[in-house]
Image (tube, rainbow, N blue to C red):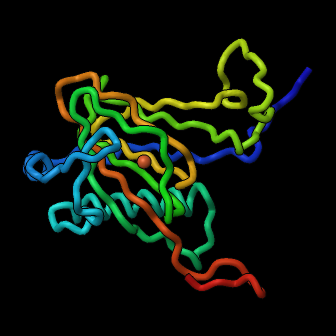
Amino acid sequence: MKYQTTPLFSIPLFYANLGTIDPLTMAWIEKLDYPDEAAGHEHTEDKYILNAPKLAGLKTQIQEACNVFVKEELKVNDDVVFELQNSWINKHSKGESNSLHWHSNAMLSGVYYIKNEPDAGDIVFNKSHLYTNLFHDTVRVSFSEPVQYNTSEFYISPRSGDIVMFPSHLEHQVTPNQTTTPRYSLAFNFFARGTVGGGTSELKI
Ligand SMILES: [Fe+2]
């Protein structure tokens, strides 16, 4: 019997490597202030960190990666561009993690891994119980092995220089840093600009 199964209505997760930060910029990042937050890790007070002149090259790389994601993979029309909005650097020292969350007031979000040694923390994507691609979460069928159709979580063990991008509603968390080396990641959000929709639903944003 020949057959095929199609992953209908899936959530896109973009994953690439942009290369690592140069040592001088890394030293500048390590010297930034990282005030304590209740969330279990620290992040920069500056929420537009990619506007820093030292990160201009990285900002361009992230915008270019987003353009590939949006145009090549998502096939968004040319009358809409995705503009970088806020961005900040997270620092996870030994034992620190990030609890389950999603990004508000954004359409696409992502993370660039400035420095992430092995065991310094995975990013885990979780399926919302309101997102039903197979059986609703009110019935928990057992499965013999995880496959893309039945899984409700997806782990990535990022390495320095990696970038991930995903729709901002996608829930995610970060596992504890099990090393003594701080983990630095740069989070960012994109929002659409241009003309969306048509007719009486047209909106210029
Ligand atoms: Fe996040």
The correct choice, above or below, for 112 with respect to 67 in the image is above
Residue 175 x/y as whole percent: 39, 29
The correct choice, above or below, for 92 with respect to 1 in the image is below
Quadrant of residue 6 within the rendered picture:
top right
Residue 88 x/y as whole percent: 29, 56
Q: Quadrant of the N terminus?
A: top right
Q: Can residue 12 be seen in this view?
A: yes
Residue depicted at x 61% and y 58%:
74
Q: Give left or right: position of 10 versus 44.
A: right
Residue depicted at x 49% and y 30%:
155
Q: Give left or right: position of 118 versus 133.
A: left
Q: In which quarter of the image is the C terminus?
A: bottom right
Q: Is residue 19 visible?
A: no
Q: Which of 135 and 63 is in front in this view?
A: 135
So how many labels did they put on this image? Answer: 0
Residue depicted at x 31% and y 64%:
60
